[in-house]
Image: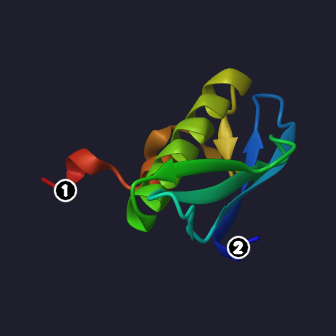
Amino acid sequence: MQAIIAETKIELSDESGTGRLIHLYIRAPFDQHDGSWGCYCNIAGEWEKELCIYGEDSFQALCLTITFLRMQVQQMLVRDGARSIHGEVSDLTYIDAMFGQVDKFH
């Protein structure tokens, strides 16, 4: 198994203040030896096992993994009705700060 190359912990809370901690991590991309690359990731506290995201090369596999995790965290916020992240009022500002916002670059 590849080494974890990036990780963070996020505390999500609902309106009642009930919170839970999730742990996002990404493992180093690896060569599939078939012309593609894979990158394992997980949201511990949400998923039971790691998922593998595939790309044409290591860079694409890593970028797609980061994008996938962003989408999953955003969906969790909507689904669970999370009202705060790390005790701060939640909107997508925190998610944009963590993952970047593409339309801000042009």
User: What residue is shown at x 33% (from left), y 50% (from top)?
Assistant: 101
Secondary structure state at the residue bearing disc 1: loop
Q: Splitting the image into 4 quarters, where does residue 74 fall?
A: top right
Q: Quadrant of residue 2?
A: bottom right
Residue 17 vertical placement versus 64 (above, below)? above
Q: Is residue 8 visible?
A: yes
> Which residue does the image show at 59% across and 59% down from the upper left?
39
Q: How many marks?
A: 2
- Pointer 1 local density, CA inside 10 Å: few below 14, some 14–19, many at least 20: few
Q: Is residue 86 left or right of residue 17?
A: left
13 to the left or right of 93: right
SS at badge 2:
loop
Q: Which residue is mark 1?
A: 105
Task: Report x, y in % for residue 46.
Answer: 81, 40
Q: Is residue 7 left or right of residue 18?
A: left
| Residue pictured at 51% horizontal, 57% vertical | 34
Q: Position of residue 60 (x, y in %)?
A: 39, 57
Q: Which mark is residue 2?
A: 2
What's under tag 2, amino acid-wise? Gln
Furthest toward the left, the residue is 106
Would you say the residues marked 2 and 1 are in contact, meaning their CB atoms lie under 8 Å apart? no
Quadrant of the image containing the N terminus: bottom right
Distance (Cα) linking label 2 and label 1: 31 Å
* Disc 1 residue type (three-letter): Phe
**In the image, residue 94 lies at what x, y percent?**
51, 51
